[in-house]
Image: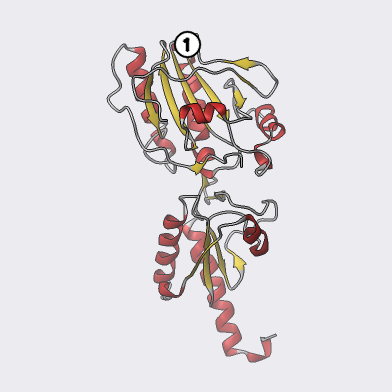
Amino acid sequence: MTVAIGASAPTFALPDTEGTMHTPGDATATVVVFTCNHCPYALAWHDRIIALAHDYAARGARVLAINSNDATRYPRDSIEAMRTRVQGGEFDDVPYLRDEFQEVAHAYAAETTPDVFVLDAAGLLRYRGAPDADYEDPSQRAAYLRDALDAILDGRDPELTQTPPVGCSIKWLQ
Amino acid sequence: MHVELLFWDGCPSHPRALADLRAAMADLGLDPSTIAIREIDTHELATREGFVGSPTIRIDGVDVQPTEEEPYGLACRVYHRRDGRVSPTPDPADLRDALRTATAHTTTLQTDPTRRR
């Protein structure tokens, strides 16, 4: 079931690549990004999302990246491959979380990589969809997410609350 | 010249790739209606076809952006544009270059039969 805009987003606790657990609480806003290691759409948008995390950290917002793909059929999404990317500096300070049993992806009804959910401080879903309008245009700078974060942090409702997620299908366990 | 586009329906990239391929062929005076479009829908078929992701475009059997590192399987394929950006589809300039190369090769074979193997 899809999480409705304005409804409480599912809470979770997931380990990062070093085993430290992370939850979406204790932030002025939280961006939950379902992503992976080998999807060209996720990779094309990756740097924009990491830049956004850096730009909004001072305002108390945080980004959590989650990999839910089936690593058995897609070994490039293994925890080892995730760790290699983190240790290579690709995620800056953004935790890269492993959703091994896909419970969080199912709870959010995530569809693609990337599929992005922006939560406010109360854990209510305020935006869901693509980072911006064009994966091929870095100048877009994840504008949908920035607009949603600006609105949340300014105490306003985001003008745009939902766009179709664009990317590779989540690789579900079989 | 045999131009084929292999795709997996679980990846949304192939309509864009097909449009780019058709445009590139039209630019070079080739007939886009000759493109052979084939769906790859099982891991077994992907392995048999050497399919490393969707879309895959081959011209006379040669991949337009050959790769030796990608495993066979049902996934979206990662391409790199000429400016280094990651993309789900090949750079249109790479498509045109691959088509030109194949056209020149075909022309050479037709005009110089001694080079035919």
Most foreground residue, A52 or A128:
A128
Q: Quadrant of the C terminus of chain B?
A: bottom right
Q: Position of residue A101 (x, y in %)?
A: 62, 30
Tell me if residue A76 comes above or below residue B17 in the rendering: above
Most foreground residue, A103 or A91:
A103
Q: Secondary structure at mark 1?
A: loop
- Amino acid on which disc 1 is placed: Ala
Residue B85 seen in render: no
Q: Position of residue B22 (x, y in %)?
A: 41, 66
Counting the numbered discs, the total is: 1
What color scheme is it? secondary structure
Q: Position of residue A140 (x, y in %)?
A: 39, 35
Query: For residue B67, what is the image quadrant?
Result: bottom right
The subunit carrying tag 1 is A
Residue shown at the point (39%, 16%) measured from the top left = A124
Most foreground residue, B89 or A77:
A77
Most foreground residue, A97 or A172:
A172
**Category of crowding for the residue at label 1, using alpha-carbon neighbours closer than 10 angstroms: few (below 14), some (14–19), many (at least 20):** some
Q: Which residue is mark 1?
A: A27
Tell me if residue A76 comes above or below residue B67 in the rendering: above
Query: For residue A83, what is the image quadrant?
Result: top right
Q: Position of residue A104 (x, y in %)?
A: 54, 26
Residue shown at the point (51%, 43%) measured from the top left = A169
Residue furthest top as drawn:
A26
Residue A76 seen in render: yes
Residue shown at the point (35%, 18%) measured from the top left = A150
